[in-house]
Image (spheres, grey):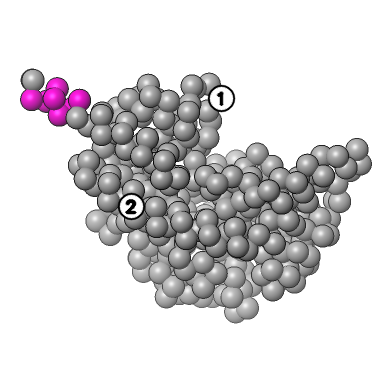
Amino acid sequence: MEEHGGNIYDKDIRIDFSVNVNPFGMPAAVREAAARGVEESFRYPDPEQRKLRQAIASAFLIPAGQIVAGSGAAELIWGITAALQPKKALVCAPSFGEYERALAARGCQVQRFFLREEDDWLVSRELVRRVWEEPGLEMVFLCHPNNPTGRLVPADILKELARACHDRQITLVVDECFLDLTREGEAASALPLQRDCPELLVLRAFTKMYAMPGLRLGWLAAGSREKAETIRQMLPPWNVSWPAQMAGCAALKEEEFARKSGEYLLREREWLSCRLGELGLRVRPSDTTFLLFEGPEDLQEACLAEGIYIRDGASFPGLRAGTWRIGVRTRKENQVLLEVLGKTMKEKETDRWQK
C-alpha cells in the first residue's frame, strides 16, 4: 500500500487524483525563475537562503531569523524531531504519516489521538484534555487542515491547544501546508499564537498552491531565533537548491494566481462533492481542495484500469478499507473521474442484481 500519493512511476496514469496539488500547474513566472536557477546552478546555492527567507519574512511579517527553509515540509518534520529529540509525542489519526515515521526514527514513543468518524473527523476539546493529562508528553503534531480528512481545527480549540502546550512546555507543531487552499486562509493560521506560545512551530510548503512538489520547498516559523537555529543545525548544508530558492521568491509574488486558483478549486470541490454523492458515494465534509469519500473496496483497482489514480485511505491509521481521497482538479478532469466512477458503480449494481 502506497504511503504517499503521486507515485505514478510504476503505473500507466493519465490523471493523478492521488495528490493534492494545484491542477493549474506552476505559474509561468515561477517556472521561469526555476529555469534561471538551473542556468545559475554551476555554483552552490546560498546555504542560508537569505533572499528566500527575507521574502517569506516580508510576506508573513515574521523575523527572517525565525524562519527555517527546507527541501519540502517532510525534511523539516524530520529536522524538528532530530533537533528536539522528544521522548514521547502525540499525533492525530488519521493524519499525515510522516510525523509518526520521523518520531519513531528517533526512538520516540508515539501516542495516537483518534479523531471520531461520527464528528466528521473534526478535532475536539478531547485533544486539549489529552494534552493536559498525558504524562511525559514533549511534542504534539497537528495538521491544519488535516490530511486526509480536509478539516480545519476550530479556532477556539487551536488557541486552547497552543496555550495548553505552552503551559506544559510541550512543542506544538502545526502543519499548515494546505492552509492557503481554504476559504479561511491566513485568518485561520496559528502564526499569531507564537507571540504568547513560543514553543509553537508552524510548517508551510510551496508544494500545493504553486504545483512544485518536484522542486521540494518548504519552510517553518519558530517562536524564537534560538529554536530556529537549533533545527537549522540538524539539516544538511545547501539543503535547498538554487532553482527552488528562486522559484520560492517568485511564487510569493503570485498573489492573483493564488487567489483565483483557490476560488476556482473551492467552488469545484462543492460541485464535485455533490456529483459524487449522486453516484451513491458517501462524501465527507472538507475545508480544502481534496475530498474523502467511501466506496467499494476495489475502487482503486477499477480506476487504475482506466488510467485514474486515487489515494487509498486505508493507508492512514484510523481509516478503513473502502475509504478514498481525491484531489480536486479541473472541471474537465473531474468529469473524467466521475465517468469512471459512475461506470464502476453501475457495473457493481448490475453484478449485485445478477447474484
Q: Is residue 8 depicted above or below 311 in this figure? A: above
Q: Residue at x 62, y 42 (%)?
A: 213
Query: Helix or strand or loop: what does disc 1 sit on?
Result: loop
- The one nearer the camera, 238 or 269, is 269
Q: Residue furthest right?
A: 43
Q: Residue at label 2? A: 271
Q: Which residues are magenta?
A: 347-353
Is residue 12 a member of the stretch shown in magenta? no
Can you say which quadrant of the picture contains the N terminus? top left
Q: Are marks 2 and 1 in contact (CB under 8 Å)?
A: no
- Kind of residue at disc 2: Trp
> Residue 347 location, x and y as percent?
20, 25
- Quarter of the image for residue 55 reads bottom right
Q: Residue at x 19, y 30 (%)?
A: 346
Residue 200: mark: none
Residue 288 relative to residue 254: left or right: left
> Residue 294 location, x and y as percent?
27, 41
Which of the two labelled residues, at mark 2 and mark 1, occupies the earlier sequence position? Answer: 1
Is residue 351 a member of the stretch shown in magenta? yes
Tell me if I can see residue 82 in this picture. Answer: no
Q: Is residue 268 depicted above or below 298 in this figure? A: below
- The one nearer the camera, 212 or 146, is 212
Q: Residue at label 1? A: 9
- Kind of residue at disc 1: Tyr
> Residue 185 location, x and y as percent?
51, 66
Classified by dominant secondary structure, the portion drawn in magenta counts as helix
> Residue 270 location, x and y as percent?
34, 55
